[in-house]
Image (cartoon, rainbow, N blue to C red):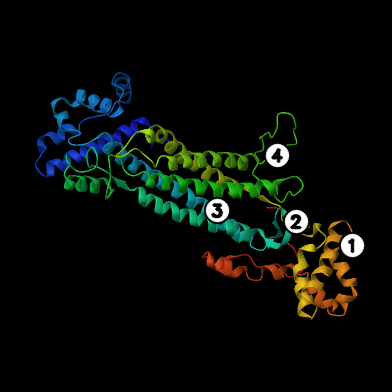
Amino acid sequence: MSEIFSPKQRYELWLRVELTVCEAWAEIGEIPRSALDRLRQARVDPDHIARLEERVGHDVVAFLDSLAESVGDDARYLHRGLTSSDVLDTALGLQLVRAADILLKDVDRLSSDLRRRAVEERATLMAGRTHGIHAEPTSFGFVLAGWLDELDRGRQRLVTAREDIRVGKLAGAVGTHATVEPRVEEWALKKLGLKVAPVTTQVIARDRHAAYLTTLAVLAGGLEKFATDIRHLQRSEVAEVREPFGEEQKGSSAMPHKRNPILSERICGLARVVRGYALTALEDQALWHERDISHSSAERIIFPDACTLLDYMLRLMAQVIEGLIIDRDRMKANLYRSGGVVFSQRVLLALVQKGMSRQDAYRLVQRAALSALDGGPDFKTVMGQSPEVRERLTDGELAELFDPAFYLRHLDVTFERLGIEPALASPFPPAGEGRGGGS
């Protein structure tokens, strides 16, 4: 990824654009074909171009002057009818397409990891949490399936953004083709693997670039969401999952016991940077008339940085998921740590089904649940001792309401929607049994 945005690669892409335009001019007889072979011998020298730019104050002019010194008189055929942004924007399009291809490979690796771990943990019971508070039972595989689904949507957005940015512009100073014939633009861009931007000014409209960077920011935000969940689940009081931690790794210079979720925290921090770059790209949309260069200085930073950061973040998250330690026993213990109140809705619905008004059933169940949360007898015991409950539910019916397998009975549907066949997924544990051991 760094190579794509290196000065040498940038100048080589500029040269590629210039030579392709020369070939297009030669196709219609405006440039002698004999000059093409000599022009193709041109080589870029980043250091020389940098020294020239210090003198002339213009990067494309310095680039062309450097080429002129290397190819001699034939340099007059370079940049025929073009303006700087023809070269810059077309080359940037090539860079961003290549960057998207790398990011798509990163996404596919992470997607594969999430899919595998979701299957492995499909029946791993844990407490679902809303507002950070126990809600109802779920499975860690179901949580991972949600991450996978979000990542798949991010991939589709990136495919769309890649196609949207896969355009070039070779239309002259204000985009009117006054100095470059449309057929030259069409021929050259087709050879470069780019589409023609239908209407341009001196630059390609920056809504395309804003959409591209916003897509990267949304992907980064998804990674931040995953990382935030991991950080919460690794807290000492929860301790349900743990990032991989090297044998010689140190968590703190002062406290030898520390094993911190630093990889997930790193992802969260970098997501903020990418979001900031997206805001800059959105602000770059509004340029004066046919162009100004208020966007240019920012783009030299935001595109290389955002693409490189997201590349790193995706790879880092893949490492976290691949090495994630999952304590299934702790997940099950935490599920019951709140006194069984995670089953309150089933009891509520059962009482309503047996003829109690919803308002009365809610008050009865809430009173028992809050008492359990405040350190009283567990929720199931209180419910079993309640005269209102006993006159409506048998002991067997009440016990069935506390079977956690009930909450996982439709997971086949979710996994099938994700394209994961039920046969590939782990079987549910029998009712009342958990899955022991960490992984």
Residue at the image position 39 percent from the left and 44 percent from the top: 209
Q: Position of residue 219 (x, y in %)?
A: 51, 49
Q: Secondary structure at mark 3?
A: helix
Q: Which mark is residue 367?
A: none
Bin the neighbour count of mark 3 within 10 Å (Cα to Cα): few under 14, some 14-19, many 20 and up.
Answer: many
Q: Residues within 10 Å of mark 2 (few under 14, many from 20)?
A: some
Q: Earlier in the sequence, mark 4 or mark 3?
A: 3
Q: Residue at label 4?
A: 259
Three-letter amino acid code of the residue under disc 3: Asp
The residue carrying pointer 1 sits among few (fewer than 14), some (14 to 19) or many (20 or more) residues within 10 Å by Cα, namely: some
Position of residue 281 relative to residue 432, above or below, is: above
Q: Which mark is residue 377?
A: 1
The residue indicated by pointer 3 is 113
| Kind of residue indicated by mark 2 | Asp
Residue lying at 31% horizontally and 27% vertically, measured from the top left = 59
Q: CA distance from mark 4 to mark 1?
A: 35 Å
Mark 4 vs mark 1: which is more N-terminal?
A: 4
Q: Which residue is mark 2?
A: 329
Q: Is residue 343 above or below residue 373?
A: below
Where residue 385 appears, as percent x and y from the top left, is 90, 71
Who comes first in sequence, dot 3 or dot 1?
A: 3
Q: Earlier in the sequence, mark 2 or mark 4?
A: 4
In the image, 437: left or right of 306?
A: right
Which mark lies nearer to you, 4 or 1?
A: 1
Q: Quadrant of the N terminus?
A: top left
